[in-house]
Image (cartoon, rainbow, N blue to C red):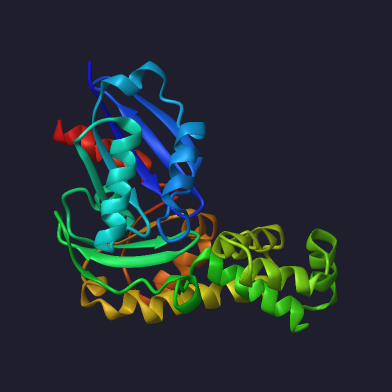
Amino acid sequence: MSFTLIADSGSTKTEWCLLDEKKAKKLTTGGINPYFITETECLDMLQRELKLGKAKDDISEVYFYSAGVKAPQNQKTMTSILKQHLGIKDVFVHTDMLGASRATCKQEKGVTAILGTGSNSCFYDGSKITKQHPSLGYILGDEGSGTAMGRKVLQHFFYQTFDGDLHEAFINKYGNDLPGVLHKVYKEPLANRYLASFTEFLTDHRGHYMIENIIEDTLLEFFTKNLLKYRESWKYPIHFVGSVAFEFKDVLLSVIDQYGLSVGSIVKSPIDGLKTYHQSLK
């Protein structure tokens, strides 16, 4: 018996699926993004968290879809890490954007957007990505993402934009430690994950007009700076993948309706779609 190992990796977590012809087993580890994790840290984490058991010896191929691997050197590094850890030669490392497109569009044309800790978008012609805006990361880009939303939450609090109730609610949940926040953002690793964690405050206070404004404004920025620049957005369905897209689906659908666009699927994770995609190739 041989297995195919599929992974979808973001900055926060990696979802794995171990496939044979009859069944699939899912596992989860920490996020693997070459921009935020070293080779040694990655190997250590895989050793600790990726529990494949006896099936590890029967894996024949790996398809690893990840953020941060568009750069050839990062792709090469991830390929080397996986070959070293799993001891197999057939390792295929692709971008998370291609993974999201294969998971949602399958063999059809469509626009795909990732809205999770970070954000990205592309046009997929049914087999490959033919158009894609550059991903500028959480400092220069990531519009519409959890990182962008978390940044707005912190701005609203520390600039004292929140009304009294929200201001108090923030203090009760997180405290009022500006030096501590600045240290985590500017001095500690994985600042993007830290910023994105503040989307929980938005979820906790849905219905308040200030919260709804943050969500809508952040998503609108993603549309104006990314999706609306694809001519194909007006012709083909737009598919969304990621925790932010799924959590704030109602606002997302409202924005889509405002622009008169066609929505495809909105899924939290692409792993099930990737499972179906790869099973169809067998």
User: Where does residue 15 sit, x and y in percent of width and height?
Assistant: 43, 40
For the C terminus, the image quarter is: top left
The residue lying at 47 percent from left, 59 percent from top is 36
Question: Is residue 61 visible from the viewing direction of this image?
Answer: yes
- Judge whether 198 appears above or below 268 on screen: below
User: Where does residue 247 sit, x and y in percent of width and height?
Assistant: 54, 55
Residue toward you, 53 or 110: 53
Residue toward you, 66 or 200: 66
46 with respect to 102 (left or right): right
User: Where does residue 275 sit, x and y in percent of width and height?
Assistant: 29, 36
Residue toward you, 164 or 180: 180
- Judge whether 76 appears above or below 222 on screen: above
- Quadrant position of residue 24: top left
Question: Is residue 23 visible from the viewing direction of this image?
Answer: no
The residue lying at 48 percent from left, 39 percent from top is 44
11 with respect to 101 (left or right): right
User: Where does residue 250 sit, x and y in percent of width and height?
Assistant: 52, 61
Q: How many labels does the image show?
A: 0
The residue lying at 48 percent from left, 37 percent from top is 28
277 with respect to 251 (left or right): left
- Judge whether 258 appears above or below 276 on screen: below
For the N terminus, the image quarter is: top left
The residue lying at 56 percent from left, 60 percent from top is 190
